[in-house]
Every structure is written in structure tokens, then in C-alpha cells.
Image (cartoon, helix red, strand yellow):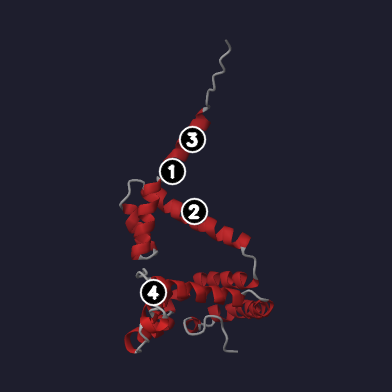
Amino acid sequence: MNAEINIKSDDEETLIKNKSDGIIKAHTKRSVLEYLKKNGCTHSNLEATARRKRDKQAVIDFICRSSEEAELLVNQQCESDSLNNINQWLQMLQRTKASTLCEYEAAAVMNAIVRNETQPKPEQLGGINLTQAYGFLENALIGQPQKKLSAASKAFLCREIELLIAEANNDRSDDESRQMGADLYDRQFKYSSEGALYNFSLNPLFLDK
């Protein structure tokens, strides 16, 4: 009987060991995800949840890798001028560290509405709680964890976001987006060299021609 014995090389065994070392168990992924959903997806929170795990670096590497893969997948599946220009804008914000000079004015407006404006009662709007909706937008604008929404409020926000996406994906929007992208490219050097970065939080797309 000729039994074929598969003998792995040292390099193959090292590769297998490295792969197994980098594997994150499903329950670990779930606990990390739940922590980030509850506390907000920031670098400090990622570090905090990773410190609670034995495989700290593997957790961080997994989250970073998953984020990069998700971004690549979106770029492959969602070809649009709007998306390309958004990516270009975000890259410039990151490169110039503009976030350190932003004052979160839009979030402050949402907060002022929540605290000071009287909203219709949910019963008058089919269960939609506008205070919850404005609070959701405020938290989204400053990267804070979201509070639980009522079913009607969640459906309302999803519908409004879908309408915005549909409005952004048409020929007219693509034409406007191409023009904004050209303006952004032409003016990024001016803004990064002339010390006018303070304008980002008030006018991030440079519409004050």
C-alpha cells in the first residue's frame, strides 16, 4: 500500500501558524462591534476595546483591514462622480488635518433644535419622533454613539437618506459634482498654503466663489 505522506516545509508551517495567530473568533468580533456601536467608532475606543482582548494587535489589524476592504468594495460597486469627489474631499481634509480647526457648527445647529425648538408630537406624525431624528443627525456629525430610535423614526430617516442618495445619482447631480470636484482640485493648494483652513467647517466644499 502506497500511502502518500504530505510533509509540510518549515515555510509552510510558519505561514499556517501566522494565519492561525491572526484569526479573530466570531464572539470577539461581535463584542468589539457592540462596544464600538455603544461608545462610538473612534481610535481611542478601538484601542480601549482591543486592550480588553488577549489578541490586541490582531483585533486592531482586523478592524483596519475590514475598513480598507469595505472602502475598496464600495469603490468597485458604486462608480459615481459624487462618490469620487467625496473621497477626494475626505483625503484632503485628512492630509491637511483640517478637523482640528472645525467647530462642528452643523452639529451645534442640530443640538440647538433639539434643545430649543418645539416639535410636533409623534402621535401627530405617525409615530415619527423628530427630536430623535435631529439627535441622530447631531451624533452622526460629531461621531458620537447613537441612541435607540423608535421604529417609525428609523424608517423615516432611512427613507430620507434613500431620497438623498437617489437625488445625488442623476445626470444633473453628476455634472454639478464634476464641477465641484474641479473647483476642489484647483483650490486645495490655495487653502492649504494660505492658512485659510478655518473655512472648512463652515464651507467644506468651497462654495463661496
C-alpha separation, residue under disc 1 versus residue under disc 2: 12 Å
C-alpha separation, residue under disc 1 versus residue under disc 4: 33 Å
Q: Is mark 4 on a helix, strand or loop?
A: helix
Residue 139 disc label? 4
Residue 147 vs residue 3, the one in the foreground: 147
Q: Which amino acid does label 2 sit on?
A: Arg
Residue at image position (49%, 54%) is: 66
Q: Mark 3 points at which residue?
A: 16
Q: Which amino acid does label 4 sit on?
A: Asn
Q: x, y (%) of residue 5?
A: 54, 19
Q: With respect to residue 208, does 55 lie above or below?
A: above
- The answer to whether mark 1 and mark 2 are in CB contact below 8 A is no
C-alpha separation, residue under disc 2 versus residue under disc 3: 19 Å
Mark 1 surroundings: few (<14), some (14-19) or many (≥20) residues within 10 A: few
Q: Which amino acid does label 3 sit on?
A: Ile
Q: Quadrant of the C terminus?
A: bottom right
Q: What element carries label 3?
A: helix
Q: With respect to residue 90, does 66 lie above or below?
A: above
**First reached walking from the N terminus: tag 1 or tag 2:** 1
User: In which quadrant of the rendered view does residue 128 lie?
Assistant: bottom left
User: In which quadrant of the rendered view does residue 41 lie?
Assistant: bottom left
C-alpha separation, residue under disc 4 versus residue under disc 2: 25 Å
Q: How many labels, in total?
A: 4
Whether residue 27 appears in this view of the structure is yes
Residue 23 disc label? 1
Residue 126 vs residue 92, the one in the foreground: 126
Whether residue 44 appears in this view of the structure is no
